[in-house]
Image (tube, grey):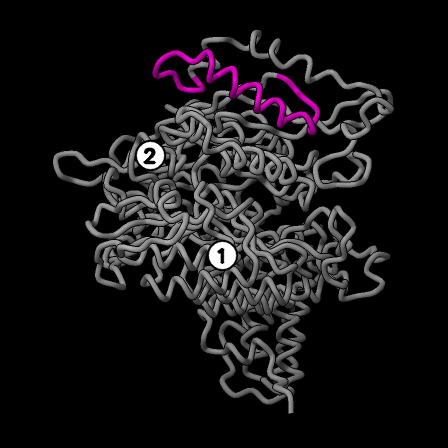
Amino acid sequence: MPNLKTWKAKLEGRMPPDWAQEIDGFEAQIELNKQGKIEPRVFAETRLRRGAYGQRYDNGRRNDGKQVRQLAYPDASTWKGPDTHWHAPGMIRIKLPWGGTNAGQLETMADLAEEYSDGVAHITTRQDFQLHFVHIEDTPDLMRRLAACGITSREACGNSVRNVTACPLAGVCAGETFDVTPYAEAIFRFLLGHPDAQDFGRKFKVAFSGCENEGCGLVMMHDMGFIAKVRDGKRGFDAYVGGGLGPVPYQAKKLLEFVDPDEILPLTQAVARVFGRLGEKKNRGAARIKFLVAKLGIDEFRRLVLEERKTLPADPRWVGLPAAQLNKKESPLRVSGTLPPSLPEGFLDFARQNVRGQAQAGYSTVAVQVPLGDLTSSQLRALAEMTRKYTKDTVRTTVEQNLLFRWIAQSDLPALYSDLRAVGLAAPNAGTISDITSCPGTDTCKLGIAASRGLGRRLSEQMDAKLQTLPPEVRNLKIKVSGCPNSCGQHPLSDLGFFGVSRKAGGYAVPHFQVVLGGQWENNGGAYGQAVIAVPSKRIPQVVDRLLGWFTSDRQDGESFGGFVKRVGKVETKNRLQDLAVVPSHDVEPDLYQDWGDPREFTIGDIGKGECAGEVVTPSEFSVTAAESEIFEAQVALDGGNQKGAVGLAYQAMIHSAEACVRSRLREYVGGADETVSKFRALFHETGDFAKHATSAQFAGHFFRHHEQKLENPDRDEAGRRVQEAQLFLEAVQTFLNA
């Protein structure tokens, strides 16, 4: 007989209770959205904050027409409901704080990619994993399976704190100041679901770097970032704020110098509160914190943050979370030895580029180049087995869409190389010019203009073919590609960057890429490149060859590519590429009118509204949505004979309903049940406002009674009445709020 237990039942007790409860609530909200009972923009932001993101080809087909996975509902294409993404294949983004993962998580990712997606898991430029072509109705079970292995998709999208990134070499790098991993983990745990991080107009990204001069942490392009410092033998951080990429990149400004490690959590909380209170809410294009810092000036912003810090009530987690993480130490699985006398073919080339000695003698990191960040399910399972075989789960993803093994014993390096080669992951080019970063572009992103992944793949092949003949000053340059100006491929930080644009020629749309030159990866993303000229997509390989040849022949001793571009100037550079920008007629060169990997004639008609910014939703609306979901769950519990559970959910719904009223008056309000009851009574009941606009004081009476008279063993009738009263109170609250 088949096992009919649901994933919820199978995983009971294996998920963190609060995560499990949130997923149950999200599942209820999906059902309510199908029924048209949730405001569309509220559900959109709700699913975004759960990591569920709409994608470009939501009919289940790729841009090449291939069907990925049949839609769950045959009539989905005609659905005109409140949020048309409830039925459609989308993307799930999965948080991996500081890129840390383990064998069990890699295996789970393999299973989920195979069962719910297209068999591929994608590493992002924020050290996340993404699964594409996932149906919304599958997401609750997918999230439960993630939660059971210790990872979440919560707040991976939307107007929230995104994945906290850190250098993948943290803790093993010989040049670092100190290991920033414990602090990155602490801030992830502290901010996940934190009430002070729920009222942003846009996303908020945090990064940590263990040193000032390298590019691993990229602090200067972040909303908030920390660079490790030591002074008189004591640890501290320089704190930065207001960086960001996008169409017009901003460099972060120094907020404070040498912050005590015990202060990084309250400082970040204070910054979040100032951003939540003063940041733009209506104009999404100006809602990132970089615009607020620029508007106020760093001195005034600093003053506001320090004033806010003084008002924060003490939180034991400020010290407790970092302290707990500092107690966790990595260690090797195997005793190190020497390299065996017989080495596999190709190992020495691989070792020269992909292997790096750790600060700990006898051990190395091994970089695994993952082309465009894509790993198949079979590769993920193989990597999980290698993780168990050679490490104590010391593996991390990188912001360059690769994977990094840590604590590999010297004697195990040839065997690991052979295992990687067996699954097609032993390219000896990690970190070279052929190791190209790309955003999803037109493959899946609604904002994609040109095929960034198609171009990235072509350039990688081009550079691979000539890598061994390239001079050292060219071999390790960085190429990054974005499908639109929004910089998701981090093109402003690369030596040679490209972002997708469209041009017209003879009445036809022609895919182009803007050429951006001279960005600086080092110094935590210390300088941004400048756009020079737009060239048809199919001619970008010629652009790269021409620029590299010019750099090689005319470079001065010790000159970097960025220094070269600055010296020769933008005018001369544009002149060198001008002929490639000329578009002949469609009859003469029809290939230019198609994009990489797409047999169709180019069009920008598929471009839609992006969801990166999320929806601006008031705290009151979130509270109402939570109440609606809890009443729905209470009804389900009642039908299933769980009277006590139904009563508990009905009471939670009433608390959230009252909280919506309080938040309509006090936007930043955060409080427990007792305080919510007290404030609701004082602000709305005793003043008569609620009875006046909600038509009756009776509904408030239901609320107060539920709070004062708990039912431990209700019968079905009592439980049914409580659920109905909660529904009436919620309806009254909505009437009051809409009056």
* Among the 4 quarters of the image, the one containing residue 650: bottom right
Decide: few, some or many residues near mark 2? Use Cα within 10 Å; few <14, some 14-19, many ≥20: many
| Disc 2 target residue | 239
Q: Residue at x 54, y 46 (%)?
A: 371
> Residue drawn at (64%, 45%), measured in percent from left and top?
615
Comes first in the chain, label 2 or label 1? 2
Part of the protein shown in magenta: 533-562
Q: Amino acid at mark 1?
A: Lys
Looking at the image, residue 677 sits to the left or right of residue 387; the answer is right
Quarter holding the N terminus? bottom right
- Identify the residue position indicated by label 1 in the image: 679
Residue 211 locus on image (x, y percent) = 29, 35
x%, y% of residue 692? 68, 56
**Crowding at label 1, few (<14), some or many (≥20) Cα neighbours within 10 Å?**
some
Amino acid residing under circle 2: Ala
Q: Is residue 555 magenta?
A: yes
Q: Is residue 187 magenta?
A: no
Nearer to us in this view, 579 or 250: 579
Residue 518 versus residue 451 in the image, above or below: above
Position in image of residue 561 (x %, y %): 44, 20
Element at label 1: helix
Q: Quadrant of residue 219?
A: top left
